[in-house]
Image (tube, helix red, strand yellow):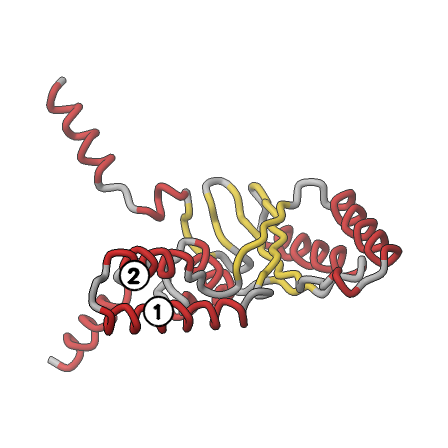
Amino acid sequence: MAKAKETRQKKKKGRSVQELLGIKTFTKYGLAVGKHELLFYLVSPTNISVLSRTNIEIKIRHLMMVLSAIPDIEITCTDSSECFDDNKSYLHGRLSEEQNPKVRKIIKKDIDFLDHIQMEMATARQFLFIARLKNAKDKQTFDAANRIEKTISEQGFEVRRMRKADIKRFLALYFEASMNGEAMPDGDGEQFFEVDDEIETED
């Protein structure tokens, strides 16, 4: 009994982040998560601050039409670039502790630099519409992917279905891993196997 419990604990400890998130692999059209396939659509944001009240109401109505036509669609809003809040928080903490005036001056310059970058990217947001398909065959997924994109586009939204590189970049930003998510390997450590293969070939 104790041996079986120890085996279960080892298996639990050995689970990867990918497994915990339920992500299986990239598919032809999106991402396989559990028993579902997720299709991602990038929708360009609209600056409603320059729109009249009437036009804002029209935009809301168009969004309601999309939600009526695709009731199961999910919407998320994320930064489209790296967030520097943690860096700034760390630097402010260092500034409060630092006694050396020269070092304090350097830290203040770093904070000002991050403030400047963040101000430039203040409107850098991206909106994602996510469709969740279950047990769909390749042809059904293809038809659904095109139908959903057409439905969103017909309501006046600038939209495009995200490809593998786009999804990888989104995941990397969402989990604060990297600004270059599209360059990451599909599987963790995959690049090292490629190196090993090259070495064996040379030998």
Residue 117: x %, y % from top left? 47, 71
In the rendered structure, find residue 152 and report the number of the disc placed on it. none
- Nearest the viewer among 67 and 124 is 124
- The amino acid sitting under disc 1 is Lys
* x then y, percent, for residue 106: 29, 73
User: Which quadrant holds residue 146?
Assistant: bottom right
As drawn, the residue found furthest toward the bottom would be 202
Amino acid bearing label 2: Leu
Which residue in the rendered view is the most extreme toward the top? 1
Left or right: residue 110 compared with residue 50: left
Q: Residue at x 41, y 43 (%)?
A: 22
For the N terminus, which image quadrant?
top left
For label 2, the crowd category at 10 Å Cα-Cα, with few meaning under 14, some 14 to 19 and many 20 or more, is some
Q: Is 22 placed left or right of 136 in the picture?
A: left
Could you classify mark 1 by the number of other residues whose Cα lies within 10 Å: few (under 14), some (14-19), or many (20 or more)?
some
Q: Is residue 140 left or right of residue 118?
A: right
Q: Is residue 19 above or below residue 82?
A: above
Q: Residue at x 22, y 41 (%)?
A: 14
The tally of labels here is 2
Whether residues under marks 2 and 1 lie with C-beta atoms below 8 angstroms apart, the answer is: yes
Quadrant where the C terminus is found in the figure: bottom left
Disc on the earlier residue, 2 or 1: 2
Quadrant location of residue 121?
Answer: bottom right
Q: Describe residue 123's horizontal placement relative to residue 154 as left or right.
A: left
Q: Give the residue at mark 1.
A: 108
User: Foreground: 202 or 107?
Assistant: 107
Q: Which residue is mark 2?
A: 95
Give the residue displayed 74% in from the left and 56% down from the top. Answer: 152
Q: Quadrant of residue 101?
A: bottom left
Mark 2–mark 1 distance (CA, rounded to whole Å) = 8 Å
